[in-house]
């Protein structure tokens, strides 16, 4: 690697709001998005909420000359969660060397049909690129939406998703030279989930790092100027909210800086109607050679222990509350099942005695349905509690090791947290 | 790292057959297993089919002085698949630095209740250890069982699981110095899934590599001498079958050899009744320093392209068949739904005309149940087809790149397949 090595990477991110039948002017917006991406010719375009595979295929055809590589993340599992797909896709100028994905295991409730998150398989997609001899791990994701900030019933799920995302990046990027994460995190910059993600992965926020920002006030990605945005949702935030991000980091030996960051401002980049209800992010990243750093900057990443410990503790508390709530619902459901079974027994006795048979049979049918339905709710919340417990166990393990590192002093940090730093080898026995 | 560096690792693996209420002499076997592990004092004991968390807690207490670190992989997701857990756990002399897991997305059918695999969350667990300055990634797993070798309806799922396992190891072990995989793969040594796993990960089979093997004939891990084994299952294999494995690899800069491998032979290691219906594996691995190899041995791993291409092709064909079958079942279910709806309409007409109401209501109830049940089957097979398609897409991508590598010649191999080899950096532009 030459010492004057430098690599420029132009990245585009957009939540496309591509819900078939529901999103307004979808076909027109997809067409304009395709035109715009062709004109701008980014290195990488990472898209969320492309729910229809037809839309992806349309874009693929349209973008083929400029972006020869593309991938659509079909999210799936053998529950009915995730039946709609992940909505994530990517178009790239550079060949995709490898790809894989992780579907989040906690993603809302099936009976909250009107929110619909459970039916979509919210996931994180990973794409590996080799650029000028460097390995770039690019991640694209979309986390569970926040529907009510005052009373966020999905908070524990969203924290668990942020943890799963951070953990997935942590385990799959150990050998990467650069890490890029783009997506709609549905998290404000000061939210617990976002702080957890940043602290555990050491990712930098392009909006905070760049010297050259152009776009909406405070980098917001949902703004009241956008005609597709439900203005009621922004009542508490008159400037808008920042929930879509470009995050990045380089491992020792390289450094990345964000030269420019632009957002759209509620309009088409060529000032027509907007491309989506979210604003697009356009970043120019510059990767340079830097001398190996054995004591990385204390302001970022897992090495700075106090903020990490504090955010891990906070996340554990949130998951504790989530576990308690899931168990409460499971207990409540078990009582309803008990009552339903009692009612069934009474009805069976009534039928046997020759009472009003027709009504009894109808009620019996309804009760069986109720017992089965609530049985499913019971099992669901039991699994939810288990899921939250697992995330908490992982968090507690990391917290324990972070505390040990703190007690042992700075010389033990690398062994605990920096095994992915280049050049680390402790002495053999 | 000193040039004469060497590390000895004693590893134990056993499928414990710990099904509450169903497995014979469970409590006694767990007690004897604990005693044995305490006496032998392995570095790592990796166990499968510890379905009851109580059993894990019992072993944890018993083994605490010898194995201070332990972890139980609670497998879960928010479908009802995986409600029983993964059954995987580990006991270790060395501190566990990190752990995570991946639950396989395809794992049999919920209506095959008697086989029960769907209800257990078959998974792969990853544990990261730091031993004498080296990073060891230890994986433990248990794949879907093979119930009928002549007509294996789960073959596509098992191939997809083997691929997911290989892919998970590939993506999470890039920075590890040593990789160890133990578990009940439910795959014979020549089975497609096993060849796929070995070719894509480059793992070595301890049984084939060791110079010093003691134990059952041909290294079998289910043998007719074991009183818990259903002899009918071994009708075609009079010596037994080898489906449990210790697999390992080191990255460039190190080499691992298997000094000794032992199996139990249908009895307790101290010649009482056996510890399980499977035989235990006990391996002594030796890690040594070796000069960096830029052209690794052509007999193993993803670098040898022809066997890789051939096994990838074979796996694609198997997944194609699986997709076709899943789609056939989905289509069949959709016809049944149509018929059920027609029947419902006729019954509603009968009730409206004042026919035999009681029977009509009962039949109506049954039909509604049928339509809903078959609707679930329809959605399930639709998702199954999607899942198999995704695994196939990943395989096809790897196949495409393997072919490209073959066409471009050997100098392009590293860029495509060996980015995890130490020392690899192509020239910058």
Image: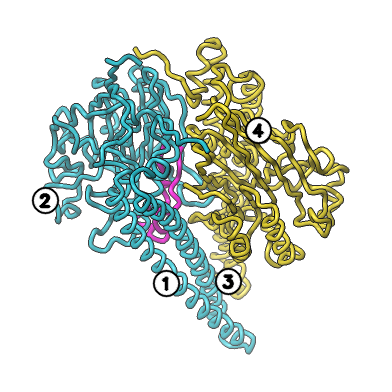
Chain colours: A yellow, B cyan
- Image quarter where the C terminus of chain A lies is top left
Residue positioned 24% across, 20% down in the render:
B39
Label 1 and label 4: CA atoms lie apart by: 45 Å
Tell whether A225 sits left or right of A201. Answer: right
Q: Is label 1 or label 4 in front?
A: 1
Q: Secondary structure at mark 1?
A: helix
Label 1 and label 2: CA atoms lie apart by: 37 Å
Foreground of the two, B368 or A207: A207
- The mark found on residue A361 in the picture is 3
- The mark found on residue B328 in the picture is 1
Q: Which residues are magenta?
A: B101-126
Label 1 and label 3: CA atoms lie apart by: 36 Å
Does label 3 lie on the same chain as label 1?
no
Task: Give the image location of residue A291, x and y in percent.
Answer: 56, 21
Does label 2 lie on the same chain as label 4?
no
Q: Which residue is mark 2?
A: B238
The residue carrying pointer 2 sits among few (fewer than 14), some (14 to 19) or many (20 or more) residues within 10 Å by Cα, namely: few
Label 3 and label 4: CA atoms lie apart by: 45 Å
The residue carrying pointer 3 sits among few (fewer than 14), some (14 to 19) or many (20 or more) residues within 10 Å by Cα, namely: some
- The mark found on residue B50 in the picture is none
């Amino acid at each position: 690697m030459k010492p004057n090595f430098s690599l420029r990477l132009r990245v585009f991110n957009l939540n496309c709001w591509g819900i078939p039948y529901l999103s307004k002017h979808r076909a027109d917006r997809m067409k304009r998005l395709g035109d715009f991406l062709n004109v701008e010719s980014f290195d990488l375009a990472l898209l969320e909420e492309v729910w229809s595979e037809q839309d992806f295929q349309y874009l693929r055809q349209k973008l083929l000359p400029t972006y020869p590589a593309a991938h659509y993340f079909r999210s799936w599992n053998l529950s009915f969660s995730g039946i709609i797909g992940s909505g994530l896709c990517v178009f790239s100028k550079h060949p995709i060397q490898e790809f894989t994905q992780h579907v989040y295991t906690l993603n809302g409730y099936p009976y909250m049909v009107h929110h619909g998150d459970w039916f979509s398989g919210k996931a994180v997609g990973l794409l590996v690129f080799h650029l000028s001899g460097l390995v770039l791990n690019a991640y694209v994701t979309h986390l569970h939406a926040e529907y009510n900030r005052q009373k966020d019933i999905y908070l524990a799920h969203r924290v668990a998703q942020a943890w799963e995302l951070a953990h997935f990046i942590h385990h799959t990027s150990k050998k990467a030279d650069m890490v890029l994460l783009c997506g709609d995190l549905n998290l404000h910059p000061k939210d617990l989930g976002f702080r957890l993600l940043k602290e555990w992965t050491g990712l930098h926020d392009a909006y905070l790092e760049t010297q050259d920002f152009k776009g909406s006030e405070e980098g917001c990605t949902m703004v009241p100027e956008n005609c597709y945005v439900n203005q009621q949702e922004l009542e508490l935030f008159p400037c808008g909210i920042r929930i879509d991000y470009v995050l990045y980091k380089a491992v020792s030996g390289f450094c990345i800086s964000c030269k420019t960051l632009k957002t759209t401002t509620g309009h088409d980049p060529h000032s027509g109607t907007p491309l989506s209800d979210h604003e697009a992010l356009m970043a120019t990243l510059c990767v340079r050679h830097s001398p190996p750093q054995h004591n990385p900057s204390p302001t970022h990443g897992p090495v700075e222990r106090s903020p990490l410990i504090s955010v891990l503790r906070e996340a554990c508390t949130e998951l504790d509350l989530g576990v308690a709530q899931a168990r409460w619902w499971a207990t409540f459901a078990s009582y309803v099942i008990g009552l339903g079974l009692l009612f069934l027994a009474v009805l069976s006795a009534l039928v046997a005695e020759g009472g009003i048979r027709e009504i009894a049979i109808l009620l019996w049918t309804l009760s069986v349905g109720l017992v089965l339905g609530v049985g499913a709710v019971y099992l669901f919340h039991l699994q939810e509690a288990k899921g939250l417990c697992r995330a908490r166990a992982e968090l507690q393990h990391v917290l324990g090791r972070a505390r040990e590192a703190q007690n042992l002093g700075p010389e033990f940090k690398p062994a605990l947290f920096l095994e992915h730093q280049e050049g680390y080898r402790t002495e053999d026995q």
